[in-house]
Image (tube, coloured by chain):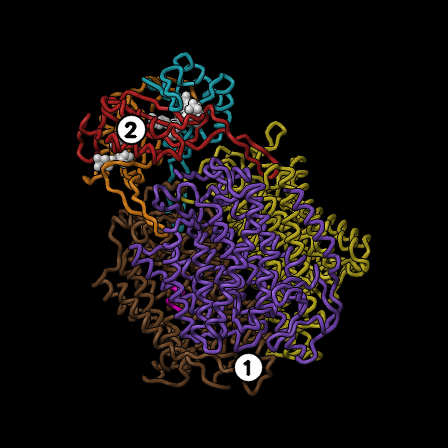
Chain colours: A yellow, B purple, C brown, D cyan, E red, F orange
Amino acid sequence: MLKRLAKILAVTAIILISGTVFAGASTPAKISLEMFTINNIWMLVATTLVFIMHLGFATLESGLTRTKNTVNILYKNVMIVAIGLLTYALIGFGLMYHGDSWLLGKCFGFGGFGLTAPAGDAGLINYNGGAYTYWTDFIFQGMFAATAATIVSGAVAERIKLDSFLIFSAFYVALIYPIAGSWGWGKGWLDRLHFHDFAGSTFVHSVGGWGALVAVMLLGPRIGKYVNGKSKPIWGHNMPLATIGTLLLWFGWFGFNGGSVLSADPQAVSYVFVTTCLAAAAGIVAASLTSWRLQKHPDLSMVLNGCLAGLVAVTAGADVLSISAAIIVGISAGIIVVLAVFMFDSLQLDDPVGALSVHLVCGIWGTLAVGLFCQEYSFLSQLTGVIAVGAFCVLGAVAIFLPIKYTIGLRMPADDEIRGLDICEHGMESYHGFQIFTNQ
Amino acid sequence: MLKRLAKILAVTAIILISGTVFAGASTPAKISLEMFTINNIWMLVATTLVFIMHLGFATLESGLTRTKNTVNILYKNVMIVAIGLLTYALIGFGLMYHGDSWLLGKCFGFGGFGLTAPAGDAGLINYNGGAYTYWTDFIFQGMFAATAATIVSGAVAERIKLDSFLIFSAFYVALIYPIAGSWGWGKGWLDRLHFHDFAGSTFVHSVGGWGALVAVMLLGPRIGKYVNGKSKPIWGHNMPLATIGTLLLWFGWFGFNGGSVLSADPQAVSYVFVTTCLAAAAGIVAASLTSWRLQKHPDLSMVLNGCLAGLVAVTAGADVLSISAAIIVGISAGIIVVLAVFMFDSLQLDDPVGALSVHLVCGIWGTLAVGLFCQEYSFLSQLTGVIAVGAFCVLGAVAIFLPIKYTIGLRMPADDEIRGLDICEHGMESYHGFQIFTNQ
Amino acid sequence: MLKRLAKILAVTAIILISGTVFAGASTPAKISLEMFTINNIWMLVATTLVFIMHLGFATLESGLTRTKNTVNILYKNVMIVAIGLLTYALIGFGLMYHGDSWLLGKCFGFGGFGLTAPAGDAGLINYNGGAYTYWTDFIFQGMFAATAATIVSGAVAERIKLDSFLIFSAFYVALIYPIAGSWGWGKGWLDRLHFHDFAGSTFVHSVGGWGALVAVMLLGPRIGKYVNGKSKPIWGHNMPLATIGTLLLWFGWFGFNGGSVLSADPQAVSYVFVTTCLAAAAGIVAASLTSWRLQKHPDLSMVLNGCLAGLVAVTAGADVLSISAAIIVGISAGIIVVLAVFMFDSLQLDDPVGALSVHLVCGIWGTLAVGLFCQEYSFLSQLTGVIAVGAFCVLGAVAIFLPIKYTIGLRMPADDEIRGLDICEHGMESYHGFQIFTNQ
Amino acid sequence: MKMIIAYIKPEKLNAVKQELYKREIFKISVTNALGCGQQKGYHESYRGADEEVNLLKKIRIEIAVNTDFVQPTIDAIIAGAQTGKIGDGKIFIVNLEECIRIRTGETGSKAIG
Amino acid sequence: MKMIIAYIKPEKLNAVKQELYKREIFKISVTNALGCGQQKGYHESYRGADEEVNLLKKIRIEIAVNTDFVQPTIDAIIAGAQTGKIGDGKIFIVNLEECIRIRTGETGSKAIG
Amino acid sequence: MKMIIAYIKPEKLNAVKQELYKREIFKISVTNALGCGQQKGYHESYRGADEEVNLLKKIRIEIAVNTDFVQPTIDAIIAGAQTGKIGDGKIFIVNLEECIRIRTGETGSKAIG
Ligand SMILES: Nc1ncnc2c1ncn2[C@@H]1O[C@H](COP(=O)(O)OP(=O)(O)O)[C@@H](O)[C@H]1O
Ligand SMILES: Nc1ncnc2c1ncn2[C@@H]1O[C@H](COP(=O)(O)OP(=O)(O)O)[C@@H](O)[C@H]1O
Ligand SMILES: Nc1ncnc2c1ncn2[C@@H]1O[C@H](COP(=O)(O)OP(=O)(O)O)[C@@H](O)[C@H]1O
């Protein structure tokens, strides 16, 4: 297993040698150097913000699970950023944005391995009235890529084998994510259909969510989660950590959605900021009231999920929804996410952090909402996109998981799961010295 | 209570329907599209930075209180961002920045409910030689709004009822904050008086601080804080969390003060960065020395307060204080904040996180300092502003709190306070599995 | 000790009175106002990002050490930001960037105490095709300065006396850091030699690392670290905190390296983003595989070190390394850092957080790598820089430490070290109420 | 009256409580403990230094009972905690001379339940 | 010599210590415990799943005393911890056969105080 | 059989374990405790309010042994934990009436080791 990874790594390095140092400044013909610089800097700031979402995921996921698996979750999240960026450089970027190198309809194309900045103006990405460099394009997109795999990480927490998860993630992020993305953002067949997914309710969140769904079904619930058919609470161990994670994710979303304008256009970016924030706020309030009513007490973890639900849902249409529509999308996402947590729980699909409810369900809802609230987009196209991407991701995830399941296996041995993945996979504890009392 | 909130929510949604999608790009006549774009992007980056201050408050406040109330504090902080943004969209923005729709002298005006971007150039906010969009204006100001209520949250921690606090916050941020703000930033009577409060020592921090003072007096101290007239230490439970909070607040302050330039003017923004940082640094050093001398040991919580004290104090004059004046303001704030903590404690005003000392006292000090150190501003005007805003906020807070006190009540039952708000209000624990030993 | 610090402070304040308020906007002649504004704003955003690295260090260092010393580490990190900024304003900036006021060859110069913005265009820093204000220059450089001292803080954790450390830091950051920096970035003799250190593998990280090495040698290992010649594990107490620290450092590195372009040049900044991120990713993967193989289990703390190792190493050549070279530098840094941790451990140089391995060793490696991978830079010049800076820093650190050692002493009494610095230096606990079990 | 002290595996606490309830023993006190017994420990490693950890997480139960409840209590603990694998734990019995209910001041067998 | 073991409510620890000091009993050992007694528990709920928590936070005190100090110790604990409400706790007394001061090796009643 | 209870300084646990192993006593249980004894406490201060802390961190060891192991156990604890300074701790010995190995149901001296 280690050897295999090591080889992949070596190949990466060799192929990437094609990457070259930038060849001096050049500007796109049509826009001023100043505008080019602004657009580019904004995209880089947005990249930085998207990066911090990985810390958001790491802290949210570890906060909502148990101390005995914390090192493992943190480890996975750190690895995923790295794997995501490297595989995206190696192959993902070429699969997703290849200009017009379609090999199979508008479904699959490939622009080549590694990174090579085209010389001169050709290297500049003109988009949405702005422009930015090839490198900006890569790093912004690369930061997005890894988030899809991170979503899976939360859903499979506390029971998946480390190496199996890493192998899955590497393939999922290297192949499934970019191919699905190429259908829309890479100007493939869904783009032709006028399918609208502004910043990735479908292409990022649902892609992650479908992978998570397959994983959860293949893995089964954590030991002790369902006892005699009854769902038992397995508390997250650190609510401040979960809150840090959620608010860092919102923080990163300013770049995730704001950067998806792909230029610094003042009206567009600022409008996206407003819809994004109001949807998040609406998600919080709605989830809070729903949880308060249904659970008698307002559950912080639900409110955190509600915040993310609003963000995920508004992501597909942050640029085209009206203010009131954005708020309604946020409110409904906040309600839906709580009900979805209950639903998955009653189906005994054990998802420790609510990733399915947040990313899959609200990703779908947000994508469909664009068709419902915006006249210029057809509900049918949106539905087609949701279903097509779903089908592809489920098939892809199964195709990656099954070989792993039948070779090295997916799930930790029961004894190790009880003792915790931190000791069994990493030989270390997350909170050394702290007295932890647990009978789970 | 839930129903009431639900109704407010519904009304919000309906009224906000007036909000419309932006009507295509347009630039203000006088400045270049490039300049417009830069200014706008900077304001949006500043907004993002101000946003993270909510995470700063959430972590600082929970770090300085006890584990048994941590979920509650986090919950309140998350809700406040949401409530702040939504009420500001609904009514606050219209109360604070309404152009010239004064109804009562230059004291009270209203520009209408909800958000509507005026068409064309009229929608662009021209300010300070720059310009930005209506949406940028709203989201930047909206992020500010919620901070005032968050300040209260820390001071009333560990004993206030959750619903009472949320209702108070909603009204305080929807009405008191924007009306007070309209007097100065909304071009009201204080602005006429040439009252200078650059980024909100008074309009944000003191407004929050006065609300906190009223709340602390109405609530009384936590059980066990004053025993036989002696003040007992009630330790904060997580110093790393408190430090994260403080440094995130400083981080956000780059946007809070830097964004308050309201343009990307190179000289102005960079100068504000320097005064802000040097005052924070001076506050740290001064609080450290003061605490070291008076408490024998240097108290980390005091140094964190000192950092914030320097920041709060420099906020009123970050643009106009000389470098040396900024440092002196920071040093004095660092000393004052430690003494103020002692003073409030001896008055048995129990403020778990030092919010009164930091935001109220240093907010006042910073506002007055502008009158002392800058010839162009009159001490009298500054004092007038401090007193007028103080009187208004105290009255406002009392007017909101009293009805709550005499209907649903303000304070948790003693038994619940002892067991902790996390269990009693939320039915959950913040650090499940950790062994917590406490005899408080 | 307190008095001494107080005096320094007073002097600071007085001298700084020379600082004046900016004298109205002015632009450099050659570039457009727009370009000036963009460059300036990017540098300020980069400053903000570099600032958050202090929170990164604070959390990383406290996460990798024991609960009983957490307050102490946090305290030191907060103080260092303050001391760094103030001393840099007082003297450091004048020592490092003094135009051409050399007093001793191109080795030592001084431009005067305090901050004074030259009037008019002269105050604008023209650099790398861009420009920014004097204030931007100061605050960006000031944020860098403090990081060097912070590096020492991690290596000496859990045993150094607080006052001794603070005095050391003040002098090291006020004198050693800027003088060394002036040799290269201040256009001194190393710059003449065509020595290339883009963003500070040598001038920041190695400078900190050499100071740390001297400190570790003078202090000796923590009690219980080496028992009968065998190294014992002393676990870090909080892995989420350490992970937060590492990812915040990476987050800050976007500003650290991206800002070191010293302009918003689209090609240059975006290219630096890509090399920086790919090197970090490569460092993570390489450290993970190395640790997995050598320690049997993959050690999270090593992977975190690997991430930082990649970042530190790529910092010297982030602008000139090819993509593949950047990845190779990252991979090698990830391997080197793990081996270096083992090496220092076998030399019984006790470095609780791996600061020597990350900052010193990989700082050197990164600097040399520029000579190896880039034809335009000579390996010999790079080596000369490494050695010269190393010799100067070691001498400087010794010159500061020895007087401290023989007056107030460097190391905590053994009993206090066992009880913990939090209780003994600060009279408080980091996690009050938590049950901590420790036999160390 | 006897004081029964048992060390069990943490994950068996719920089962033991269940078995005790079945036998109408409702009052217990629990602390977390570390135990070193026959059970093999595990290896922790950190930054290149290793350590054999043989203090494993256990739960310590204390139950004060009247003499006629001793056997049911033992039975209940064994029923709930036995897996047959090394590390199942121990039960210790100590004589209890007096028991007082703080609330009422009652003593002896009346106070125990 | 007797070993006195008491379970009390956490918030009563200071009061109990005060009362013990009044009676010149200065040496005690304290651990935190979870207790399941007559006192009603509370409900915790998390993400839709509920659980009745009946292991409540208690403090366990251990005091070794010479026989003539037994009654004062009991009195002190009751004086400090009694509220009259369910959950006040219990005191258990066990015979103590020997006591050794590690520092000096002294044994018996001399070692206890 | 006897139950030996000892309070020692936390940093002495490893030494005590070493000494016990030398005397072939392998089974022990450990909890963390707070102790209030002759040892001076320290001063904590927080935001201007002070408190004398006299509950110091201690480790509580429980070892059940057959009677002929009592003296070796005491010797081992003293050998490992004694520094001669105040706060070294105490050893208490209580009579143990029965011991049962949960795994096998064995009782008495056979079960203890
Ligand atoms: N003689 C003893 N004294 C104190 N504690 C003991 C003793 N024997 C066992 N224990 C406790 O019981 C736990 C389980 O003991 P172990 O011998 O591993 O069980 P088993 O005999 O069922 O395999 C130990 O971890 C320890 O906490
Ligand atoms: N028989 C017992 N064995 C062990 N612990 C007990 C027993 N009875 C009570 N306790 C401890 O004392 C605590 C208080 O007991 P409880 O019955 O609730 O008090 P009260 O009888 O005063 O209402 C319990 O939570 C438990 O920790
Ligand atoms: N009579 C006692 N009852 C309960 N615990 C005791 C008693 N005497 C001592 N201890 C425990 O032993 C620890 C050390 O006792 P101390 O008197 O300070 O030691 P020494 O007598 O060696 O100086 C105390 O902190 C406490 O936990």
Q: Which percent across, then down, holds residue A19?
A: 59, 69
Q: Nearer the viewer, mark 2 or mark 1?
A: 2
Report the side of C228 relative to A207 (left or right).
left
Which residues lie in the magenta part? C79-85
Amino acid type at circle 2 is Ile
Q: In front here: A159 or C51?
A: C51
Magenta includes E74? no
What residue is drawn where x is 39% and y is 44%? Answer: B225
For label 2, being within 8 Å of ligand 3 is answered: yes
Q: Which percent across, then down, holds residue C190?
A: 39, 79
- C370 shown above or below B339: below
Farthest residue, direction top: D68
- C77 shown above or below A229: below
What residue is drawn where x is 47% and y is 39%? Answer: B417
Question: Does residue C292 show up?
Answer: no
Mark 2: secondary structure = strand
Mark 1 belongs to chain: C
Report the side of C241 relative to F62 (left or right).
right
Mark 1: secondary structure = loop
- Would you identify the image quadrant in which residue B357 lies? bottom left
Report the side of B154 relative to B26 (left or right).
left
Looking at the rendered image, the quarter that the N terminus of chain C falls into is bottom left
Residue that badge 2 annotates = E63
- Would you identify the image quadrant in which residue A381 lies? bottom right
- B191 shown above or below A240: below
